[in-house]
């Protein structure tokens, strides 16, 4: 352990006055502007030779450089912690778009053969078209709220949900590595549901003659 110097006037380490009183334990608030008096028992310091490294600051010198809070001298500032955002590849709206061919066909059959509600195919397809476009708008809005940097435009759904789901799958795979399920579901259900929908439409159109529909 180093020995503390005796009480006396020393050059002010804070540079607020020429001299500051050292009590033998710590610096006081007393300062003066007179010539410094050498301490009684302080040994004369030998001049530093050229190339000699600087002497470390003594432990009793409490006026050192201001150290930034939360950092160590010479240490680089900590790198900012990256925020990890977990993006959902799909949600319920996406799966409704993917299963829309099957759901539309089942609803058409239930209305016609289960409830006896005869709807012409063209008005039904127009209503289904509007619903799928609305689902695409909702899905794109949810992707934006989830934090996707790039999203498909809902206008793609004007050409059926297939192009919208194709672009959506590409953007989802870029951000999350997944999200191809709804596109695959749409392709599969479209192939399976098309014959059933065409058959039901033909039957309903034939039956529509009883209600004065054009054949």
Image: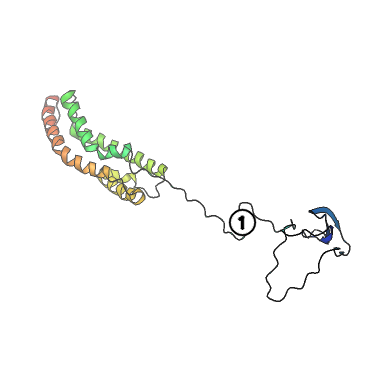
Residue at 25% x, 35% y: name it. Answer: 128
Most extreme residue toward the bottom is 50
Q: Which residue is mark 1?
A: 72
Name the image quarter holding the N terminus.
bottom right
Quarter containing the C terminus: top left
* SS assignment at label 1: loop
Q: Is residue 120 above or below residue 75?
A: above
Q: Nearer the viewer, residue 200 or 173?
A: 173
Residue 29 left/right relative to 69:
right
On screen, residue 187 above or below 209: below
Q: Quadrant of residue 88?
A: top left
How many C-alpha atoms fall within 10 Å of the one at disc 1: few (<14), some, or many (≥20)?
A: few
Q: In this rendering, is residue 16 above or below 169?
A: below
Q: Residue at x 25, y 44 (%)?
A: 183
- Can you see residue 118? no
* Residue at the limit of the structure toward the top, as seen here: 115
37 to the left or right of 183? right
Q: Nearer the viewer, residue 68 or 111?
A: 68
Residue drawn where x is 26% and y is 34% of the image: 127
Q: Quadrant of residue 12?
A: bottom right
Residue 45 on image: x %, y %: 78, 69
């Amino acid at each position: 352990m180093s020995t503390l110097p005796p009480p006396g006037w020393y050059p002010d380490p804070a540079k607020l006055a020429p001299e500051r009183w050292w009590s033998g334990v710590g610096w006081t608030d007393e300062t003066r502007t007179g010539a410094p008096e050498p301490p009684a028992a302080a040994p004369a310091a030998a001049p530093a030779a050229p190339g000699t490294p600087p002497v470390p600051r003594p432990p009793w010198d409490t006026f050192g450089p201001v150290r930034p809070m939360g950092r160590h001298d010479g240490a680089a500032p900590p790198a900012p912690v990256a925020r990890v955002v977990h993006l959902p590849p799909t949600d319920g709206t996406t799966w409704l778009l993917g299963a829309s061919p099957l759901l539309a066909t089942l609803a058409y059959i239930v209305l016609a053969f289960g409830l006896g509600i005869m709807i012409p195919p063209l008005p039904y397809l127009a209503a289904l078209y509007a619903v799928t476009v609305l689902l695409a708008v909702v899905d794109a809005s949810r992707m934006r709220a989830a934090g996707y940097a790039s999203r498909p435009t809902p206008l793609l759904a004007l050409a059926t949900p297939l192009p919208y789901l194709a672009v959506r799958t590409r953007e989802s795979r870029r951000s999350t590595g997944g999200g191809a399920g709804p596109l695959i579901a749409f392709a599969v259900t479209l192939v399976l549901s098309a014959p059933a929908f065409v058959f039901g439409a033909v039957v309903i159109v034939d039956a529509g003659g009883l209600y004065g529909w054009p054949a």
